[in-house]
Image (cartoon, grey):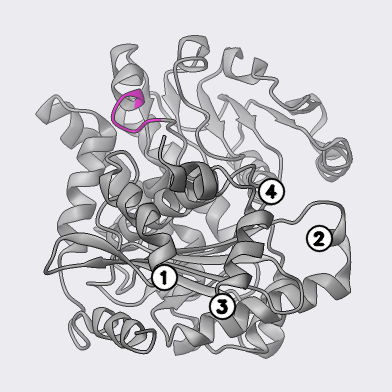
Amino acid sequence: MSAARADLLDLEPERFAARLRDEGGRAYLTWDHDARRVVASAPWLDELASWLGADERDFHEHEGVFMAVGPETGALMTAVVHKTVRGQAAGGLRQWPYPRLEALIRDGLRLSLGMSRKNALAGLWWGGGKGVIARQRGDRHADPGYRRALYREYGAFTTSLRGVYVTAEDVGTRPEDLAAVFETTRFATCVPASVGGSGNPSPATAKGVVCAIEGALAHTSRGTIAGKTIAMQGAGNVASYMIGELLEREVGRVIATDICAARCEQVRDRFAHAGDRVEIRHAAPGDLAIFAEPCDVLAPNALGGVLGPETIPMIQAPIVCGAANNQLLDDRRDDRALAERGIIYVPDFVANRMGIVNCANEQYGNLPDDPAIERHFSRDWDNAVFVVTKRILARAEREQTTTSLAANALADEACRVPHPIWGHRSRTIIEGLLANTR
């Protein structure tokens, strides 16, 4: 292990933030397209750049990892940009407690790659990016005053990137937080409807995941959702809307687990009218019992990295399709493990696209039952969630490959198509940002 790895990647984010503040408060790690290597904005980050460039699992020539420290809060804030060939990097802003800097960076790399593929498959003229805030120790994150200061800082940080990254809502970030972001940047979506935005993307995300489940059932000739049993890990915002959509489609039973007891009680109350068709179980952190639940569809709806050597042998479902991002612990290993067990896996960026679809183009105005949104839920549009899900599953079957590889191939082809008006403008903006740091 190099000294830089010990000193930087193994640091808790708050300790790295303190070091970054001492070094000026901002730092970049960017991909040099000509030299084919990662370049750091300051010499003290050179070894970190070398580590990033040598990583073969999560680094895919990402255009930039941008970091800053909140001037008032001291929080570590990042924006990770994968590709901007199709347009500015768009993706949600996550606030989460990371044990080490490496975990934070890897999460940003994986999530931004997923956004590139998700946006491309959805036909959006956006690249892929992800914002990550390292949640600080203690309970400060629950204080409204602290949150407003934190998200205003993130908005100012986003503004400083000159539009390379456009932020949105994600895990740990609430609609009111996006309102605070919007106070200090124009480069934000999912902003409240009160200021002209699209608001909470969870209902659209949930409906899209259910459409993907329907596509997987159709591909495997298993009929409709009616009468089926759906097991869910996670009963949060998106999952609760999924339960509503499933009940409308006459699902037989929904079994969902969540680590938050209060959340479990809220969801039980919300769906009390469904009787024993909806069962919400409180689970301890690390409790994986839901993966062994006999069901027709397993829906991972919490955090990513849950499908791996420990959980895949447990699964008693023919289909896995959920709302969580980056569900595979290792996408080159675990998709194959699922296929070898005969389990149909719908890649997350195929199923959960509707969050970004709902908000990405909100600057163009909105309509009730907007046809630009509703067509994604249809059965007859060539790029609808249901249709694309079936297409990817059929391609994987035809080419005798995994569903992840089939989806990645389709998405990566689309990722290489430049924006029809602006081309690869964001690359030029990044070069301008770097010029200002020299």
Label 1 crowding class (10 Å Cα cut-off): few <14, some 14-19, many 20+?
many
Residues rendered magenta in the picture: 330-334
Q: Nearer the viewer, residue 112 or 146?
A: 146
Label 4 crowding class (10 Å Cα cut-off): few <14, some 14-19, many 20+?
some
- Is tag 1's residue or tag 2's residue first in the polypeptide sequence? 1
Tell me the mark number nearer the camera, choosing from 4 and 3: 3
Q: Is residue 333 magenta?
A: yes
Q: Residue at x 19, y 32 (%)?
A: 396
| CB under 8 Å between discs 1 and 4 | no
Q: Which residue is mark 3?
A: 24
Q: Which residue is mark 2?
A: 141
The CA span between labels 3 and 1 is: 12 Å
Q: Secondary structure at mark 1?
A: strand
- Is tag 1's residue or tag 4's residue first in the polypeptide sequence? 1
Does residue 58 sit above or below 216 in this rendering? below
| CB under 8 Å between discs 3 and 1 | no
Quadrant location of residue 219?
top left
The residue furthest front is: 3
Does residue 204 sit above or below 251 in this rendering? below
Q: Amino acid at mark 3?
A: Gly
Can residue 156 be seen in the rendering of this structure? Answer: yes
Q: Which residue is mark 1?
A: 28
Which secondary structure is most common in the magenta stretch? Answer: loop
Quadrant location of residue 71?
bottom right
Position in image of residue 5 (x %, y %) = 46, 44
| CB under 8 Å between discs 2 and 3 | no
The CA span between labels 4 and 3 is: 24 Å
The CA span between labels 1 and 2 is: 26 Å
Q: Secondary structure at mark 4?
A: loop
Q: Amino acid at mark 1?
A: Tyr
Q: Which residue is mark 4?
A: 97
Position in image of residue 88 (x %, y %) = 35, 77
